[in-house]
Image (spheres, coloured by chain):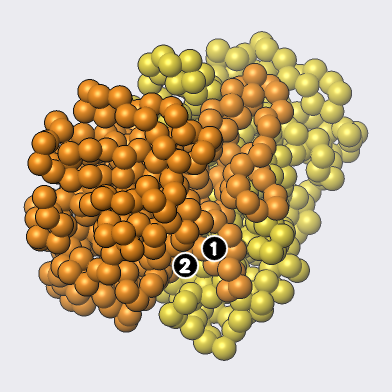
Chain colours: A orange, B yellow
Amino acid sequence: MLKSEGLNVAVVGVTGAVGTRMLKMLESSPLPVKSLFPLASVRSAGKKVLFCGKEWTIEEAKPESFEHIDIALFSAGGSVSKQLAPEAAKRGAIVIDNTSAFRMDKDVPLVVPEVNEQALFKHHGIIANPNCSTIQMVAALEPIRKAYGLTRIIVSTYQAVSGAGAKAIAELESQSKAVLDGETPEVAIMPVKGDKKHYQMAFNAIPQIDLFQPNDYTFEEMKMINETKKIMDDQEIKVSATCVRVPVSISHGESVYIEIDKTDVASADLKHLLADAPGVILEDDPANQVYPMPASATGKKEVFVGRIRRDPDVANGFHMWIVSDNLLKGAAWNSVQIAESLLKLGLVKV
Amino acid sequence: MLKSEGLNVAVVGVTGAVGTRMLKMLESSPLPVKSLFPLASVRSAGKKVLFCGKEWTIEEAKPESFEHIDIALFSAGGSVSKQLAPEAAKRGAIVIDNTSAFRMDKDVPLVVPEVNEQALFKHHGIIANPNCSTIQMVAALEPIRKAYGLTRIIVSTYQAVSGAGAKAIAELESQSKAVLDGETPEVAIMPVKGDKKHYQMAFNAIPQIDLFQPNDYTFEEMKMINETKKIMDDQEIKVSATCVRVPVSISHGESVYIEIDKTDVASADLKHLLADAPGVILEDDPANQVYPMPASATGKKEVFVGRIRRDPDVANGFHMWIVSDNLLKGAAWNSVQIAESLLKLGLVKV
């Protein structure tokens, strides 16, 4: 519901897969929104979006768009954020940026509210929303880290195509149709829109998300490694990642191996912890085939954890399976949740 | 080509996803086949199969079917193997069994020819073909184990539905069509035909393959753990597995982490090793986006390895991505390859 006293909120990239969900998350949030400023590229300017039962006209995102904005949610790609987020901050808006543009900047808090909400106090106008696959992992592991210490993480991801945007979902659908009809699928976007080669995503698995780095890890893998250490504020945790795209539209799966500081912890202890953890839902009942899956996590805000079991040979080693909606907790919901935290901590005033 | 002097070969379960491929692998093998004995359940008896340009009539598999058979390839499910493989062996046939029925029996060699061909000398009439996901992993890791020692394996699988048979492929296709048409998909087979609950496989990932065991690992995961140790003849290797089914028709992917005995090995050393390894094809050129994928591995007999890189924090730790056609090297081809090894080693005589 719109408030007469409240915040002016801008959403940059409002027509995208994440932007549309930011509006939904804002609508269901207790955050007092006075006015919405839907922003996008010039192509979308003039179109309308529905928010809180009212039509709002999309305007082209420009430096001047951010005059009188309290909170600006950015999800229009790294280059747009690099150009416009400092302009918005300069004009007094607090930017919550969903791209990787500022995540590793020392002056930019990288925040998952369940993990490091207090880092928000150190912001200088820009706050970064972590990478989707990182968010769900650290949200699930933080309760374990707090209770038992965390020395090592090895993650293999099963990532949905929506992480590459709405066009990637459309490509998966059209490719799937083509394959089922016995036709040759058109291949134009996956694995990485700007890379040299493209491969069929339908009924396939592609071990490349984002561009390769000089060390032969992909940028997505390095994001998981570096962001995890920054969010948990611990450069000593050993983190490694293998990121793979699978033909799923929404919600990432993660097979995660961890080592903790103690050897006398049972998998039941971890389950008890996670059953009460904020933002986490334990789905772990093998006898009744209860475990997280993308199909059941999609559309929900929580991080789902299951398949928790001790390593057969390593007393302080545990395996688990973590699933969450990459467009919600992985992006839109975590961004709006950060806005809610800002209000709660008195960092933004109505 | 059929030989006037040669072997009488029975194929049990000849109409299945693996059985049909066993015929193809036999056709292209130098193995001298004199006569084919296609066997199946009573439902398929009387139907014809084409082999080496000739039609052969399927007969019902019974104990007497194995009189005068030299080699019997079984792939009709564990219960059929349990009942009929001993009957075939009793009648002098050498059984190569693709099910899990005898794999962990002390008297049954569990063989991947690139790894432990010599174990065939110890057979007593029955030889087991390992689990599909195990075969491709050990074929890729054995050259590394030989050169540098292998102390630890952590694997997360991305397994194709064809591992659950031809009906699972059909289910994935019909579910995919339903979802794309906006209809509710019918759910009857996955993740495990005989288990209590079934879940949508299309555009989903399911962290259950085969039934759960009392230790909360699935039987598929325990197969990977136990079979790897048996094939490599080393109970000291630490092995753990998380097995996940993905909406791919054919070819399994595996994200594999290993630790070796030495700390002065570079990822380039592992690549050199695997480039020359038998049955392995190195596909590892990140700069040119060259890596293995199910879509490119399907229909090929080799095991494809790529994405080899050192762990960021552990000097003797390496990550890699292994893909192979689960119906060929994971089943039909490895079985026929075992038959070729038997002939080469003089364990079967023409």
Left/right of residue B225 with respect to residue B8 in the rendered view: left
Give coordinates of residue A82: x percent, y percent.
Answer: 46, 61
Q: Residue at x 38, y 26 (%)?
A: A48
Type of amino acid under label 1: Thr
Type of amino acid under label 2: Met
Left/right of residue B125 with respect to residue B313 in the rendered view: right
Q: Quadrant of residue A38?
A: top left
Q: Which residue is mark 1?
A: A218
Q: Are marks 1 and 2 in contact (CB under 8 Å)?
A: yes
Task: Bin the neighbour count of mark 2 within 10 Å (Cα to Cα): few under 14, some 14-19, many 20 and up.
Answer: many
Of residue A46 and residue A333, the one placed in the foreground of this image is: A46
Q: Which residue is mark 2?
A: A222
B232 is higher (above) or lower (below) than B176: below
Any part of residue B60 in sight: yes
Q: CA distance from mark 1 to mark 2?
A: 6 Å
Give coordinates of residue A272: x percent, y percent.
Answer: 10, 55
Of residue A316 and residue A293, the one placed in the foreground of this image is: A293
Residue A49 badge: none
Of residue A134 and residue B78, the one placed in the foreground of this image is: A134
State the SS at label 1. Answer: loop
Any part of residue B252 in sight: no
Q: Residue at x 61, y 34 (%)?
A: B18
Give coordinates of residue B34: x percent, y percent.
Answer: 83, 33
Which subunit holds the residue at mark 1? Answer: A
Residue extending furthest toward the bottom: B264
State the SS at label 2. Answer: helix
